[in-house]
Image (cartoon, rainbow, N blue to C red):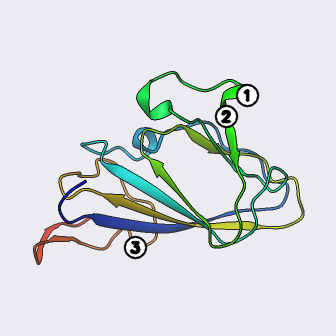
Amino acid sequence: MGGRSRRRSGRRCRRPCSSEEGWHRDLETDQHTLPELVTALIYLDDMDAESGATLVWPGSHHHREPKPSDAESVPVRARPGSVLFLHCLTAHRASTNMTDRHRSILIHEYKSARTVELTPNDAAFGDLPLRRKGRTVSTL
């Protein structure tokens, strides 16, 4: 993903006893012109199977099947400060938080300078102008 990149940020908090999120690929939900996008999930709380761990489907960025079988998904167990990097074509989802604790994640997206977002940006700071080589090239 050569060249200068653009970053978008947000925060997600899964409440106690919250329901799970469906399988998705970030490029499907946040459409871009090129699949040159990586999301960094920075865990602020302990993450395990009971607290609604992120489930990933290893290798799913190489094919287009809609969702994995239970045996193909892998829960991400993380300590506070851990970071998970997901390519925009990697299928993933949040599982159900079965605890009485909140779990928080900071979300940062990084994309190549050639990649342009096609859908509205609902993230924090999403309305900031995009600058490349010191010039404003778009405002969202």
Secondary structure of the residue carrying tag 2 is loop
The location of residue 34, given as percent across then percent down, is 26, 42
> Which residue: 10% across, 73% down?
133
Residue 24 position by quadrant: top right
Label 3 to label 2: alpha-carbon separation: 32 Å
Q: Three-letter amino acid code at disc 3? A: Phe
Residue closer to the observer: 70 or 22: 70
Q: Is residue 47 left or right of residue 89?
A: right
Residue closer to the observer: 109 or 138: 109
Q: Are marks 3 and 2 in contact (CB under 8 Å)?
A: no
Crowd tier of the residue under label 1, counting other residues whose Cα lies within 10 Å: few below 14, some 14–19, many 20 or above: few
Residue 79 position by quadrant: bottom right
The residue pinned by badge 2 equals: 73
Secondary structure of the residue carrying tag 3 is loop
Q: Is residue 75 left or right of residue 1?
A: right
The location of residue 92, given as percent across then percent down, is 58, 41
The location of residue 125, given as percent across then percent down, is 40, 73
Precedes in sequence: disc 3 or disc 2: 2
Label 3 to label 1: alpha-carbon separation: 36 Å
Q: Which mark is residue 70?
A: 1
Q: Is residue 98 left or right of residue 39?
A: right
The residue pinned by badge 3 equals: 125
